[in-house]
Amino acid sequence: MDFLQQSVQNRIIVLFIAAAVDLLIGDPHWLWHPVQGVGTLISFFEKILRRIFAVPPRPEQPGKEEEPGFHTRERIAGVIMVLLVLEVSTGLILFLLAVCGWIHPWLRLLFEGVLCGRLLALHSLGEAGYSVRDPLLRGDIEGARRAVSMIVGRDTERLNEEGIAKAAVETVAENTSDGVTAPLFYMILFGGIGGIFYKAVNTMDSMTGYKNARYRYFGTAAARLDDVMNFIPARLTALFMILACYLPGKASVTAAGKAVRIPDGAAAYRIWRRDRLKSPSPNSAQTESVCAGALHLRLLGDTWYFGELHHKAEIGDGGRSVEPEDITRSVRLMNRTAMLMFAAGILLLILAGLTHGSRFL
């Protein structure tokens, strides 16, 4: 068996270990997560680089001009932070993989598989969605509001019952790509290194990719790199999500005065074609538009962030109010989408192994 076949075989083993770890263990609060380490690196390098480049975070001061070169130095500091975080995080994982491989090849596979499983968020996203749904079903609006505040970046104080359910559905739909299929995509291509590289970029965007006074310039590099990294995975995920609508298992709802079966694949495709670019981000509306069409909902719209109202275009035709059970439906759609991408990735790896040798495994 040549090197490529060994690599393909090992990648498949790693992916199955990763799937088992994510589905069986998920992300318990007591267990350290690799993203916590990446977050620590981001905070450390931001603090150091702001001091070196003399760009301390400042509050928004309308009408006040910054001294010449301040924002340029912020952008440069942000670029250096991205490079340092990626170098340290991926370098550390490469070193640990080499050490494990030196001890025993199976230890390397186990370590890489567990790492990849910890970088996937299928289990934890489902739990997060249900943590919002369950209080809503009990009529505990304050409990649901607290739960949804843990998984969204928007202000939640103004949200009513429908707004809370809508925020949870949008989060599950968007993070189907960011938290599950995008890291899976890079794991299929590059294994654990691909997974940690993607999660480092995604975490930097989550922590610094805001258009506020602190990060509008410092976080530009992280936000743009995240857009690039998610460009292909977001679109692949949208297509797999549309396909997932045609799998068995549908529910009947009343939308626009008539009974419909959801998830609706035809509506998902139509709304995706029409609304997939209706977002400030080039990628987030890809999956949100599919979910809106599949469930016959209207998502996005005006949203409050840090006390400031942000105007966003609505996606989907609606036809009915968002209800707590739509969180269940969005999680189910996410699970099916992940299953399809996982199966497609394994099939492609098997075909790659067969193409480059007469035998596989």
Image (tube, helix red, strand yellow):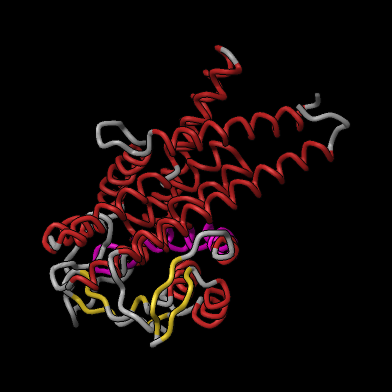
**Which quadrant, please, contains the N terminus?**
top right
Query: Residue 85, can we see it?
Result: yes
Q: Position of residue 164 (x, y in %)?
A: 23, 67
Range drawn in magenta: 212-239
Q: Main secondary structure of the magenta part?
A: helix
Q: Is residue 73 visible?
A: no
Q: Is residue 300 above or below residue 2?
A: below
Magenta span contains residue 225: yes
Viewer-side residue, 99 vs 254: 254
Q: Residue at the right extreme?
A: 358
Residue at the spot 31% in from the left edge and 73% down from the top edge? 322
Relative height, residue 274 to residue 305 (above, below): below
Q: Is residue 18 left or right of residue 351?
A: left
The answer to whether residue 199 is above or below residue 256 is: above
From what the image shows, is residue 196 above or below residue 129? above
Residue 25 picture location, percent across and down = 38, 33
What residue appears at the point 34 percent right and 81 percent down from the top-left corner?
A: 320
Residue nearest the viewer, comparing 249 with 77: 249
Which quadrant: the C terminus? top right
x then y, percent, for residue 14: 57, 32
Going by the image, does 237 lie left or right of 151?
right
Find out whether residue 355 is within the magenta segment.
no
- When asked about the image quadrant of residue 280, the answer is bottom left
Q: Residue most toward the bottom?
A: 257
The location of residue 28, given as percent across then percent down, is 29, 36
Q: Is residue 179 left or right of residue 133?
A: right
